[in-house]
Amino acid sequence: MSEEHVAHESLAARASQPIRVGVLGFGGLGQAAARVLAPKQEMIWVAAADQKGFAYDPSGLNPDACIQTYHAHGSLGYLEGLGVLSDNGIQDLIEKGDAVEGYFLALPNLPNDFIASVVRQFMAAGWKGVLVDAIKRTSAVEQLLAMKEELQAAGITYMAGCGATPGLLTAAAALAAQSYAEVHSVKITFGVGIANWEAYRATVREDIGHLPGYTVEQARAMTDAEVEALLDKTNGILTLENMEHADDVMLELAGICSRDRVTVGGVVDTRNPKKPLSTNVQITGRTFEGKISTHTFTLGDETSMAANVCGPAFGYLKTGVGLQRRGLTGLFTAAEVMPHFVR
Ligand code: NAD
């Protein structure tokens, strides 16, 4: 049998296997990711790392056992039989988790170049595969865009901005734009309801970094008591306007409109799982006949932030694996390719 034939057969064998995925960060989104993957046939969750350790089992991790362990002890490193305590969980997992084809980076981007530094770790280790983030800030996506050629050379297929916003709503805007000859504005308004802020500490801290008078660094440095004191003053509500959100650079890069036509804002209720308003994106433009119109895509109020972030993240991971298997590496954004549905 020729070498080419053997390579072709192993590719075909791989394609029929579930995709082995890992999750970096095991807070609110990381845990939701484990639950989202549990009923899937096309993906199997085999690895996760948090700040104090990691767990890896190429035949699959048990979400309940992992979540219970994390809640009881604060790290997956305590998982019986499989957990490893480590201050360098990500690095250790990159080295040990050789079966992992793709990772969802459910990590805080604090400081604002943290995710970019994690990506450098993957490249330095010679790891090849798919990485997906749900990163939010324009400046954070720009750091990754600058690494496009290095990622390509490293054999990594990187899917950027693949949560809800940026992510699902950006992709919806890209699709809606097809009706128009010119896109005048893309307006994203999100409503998030969570029962308590501790379940999504990084998300809440990063949102505080968008409030007038706050920076990412200030939000990062706030103690939990300071975050609570701020939320007490606002009755648990964060109102965000004109946010620095990467939907703008992603839509500009996809050729849909210039970034100044994209606005993002929203309301986060940190004390009530009910959404304070319906998340939506409005795409206004001019058709070829000269008519001005607006398409609106509204998410169902019953869908949680976790559902609208983790679903797209794994949809884009599946797309990324398809690109990677065809030899396409480098960086892609959620506005550039469609997420594939994970069965
Ligand atoms: P969280 O605070 O609940 O959890 C963070 C996890 O990361 C924890 O398990 C922590 O131990 C781990 N971690 C921190 N530093 C680490 C390190 N050095 N090595 C390994 N693990 C480390 O976070 P969250 O609220 O789930 O948010 C995760 C990210 O998702 C945030 O950056 C947030 O902005 C983003 N997010 C994006 C969207 C979107 O629509 N694009 C929506 C919500 C959240």
Image: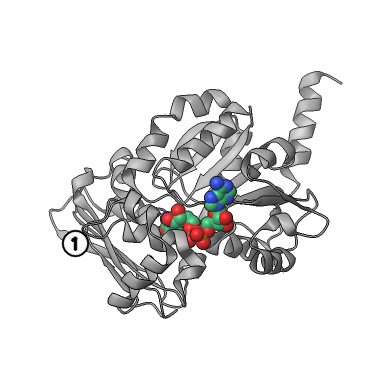
Note whether residue 144 is visible. Answer: yes
From what the image shows, is residue 177 above or below residue 91? below
Residue 210 placement (x, y as % from top left): 28, 57
Residue plotted at (57% across, 29% down): 123
Q: Along the horizontal axis of the image, is 176 left or right of 182?
A: right
Badge 1, how many Cα within 10 Å: few under 14, some, many 20+? Answer: some
Residue plotted at (28% across, 47% down): 248
Front residue (pair 57, 287): 57
The residue that disc 1 covers is 293
Residue type at mark 1 is: Ser
Residue 245 placement (x, y as % from top left): 31, 51
Q: Along the horizontal axis of the image, is 65 left or right of 194?
A: right
Q: Along the horizontal axis of the image, is 265 left or right of 15?
A: left
Helix, strand or loop under label 1: strand
Residue plotted at (87% across, 21% down): 1
Q: Along the horizontal axis of the image, is 92 left or right of 147?
A: right
Front residue (pair 282, 231): 231
Circle count? 1
Residue plotted at (46% across, 25% down): 149
User: Mark 1 near ligand 1 (CB under 8 Å)?
Assistant: no
Task: For the C terminus, give its image quadrant.
Answer: bottom right
Residue 243 placement (x, y as % from top left): 26, 55
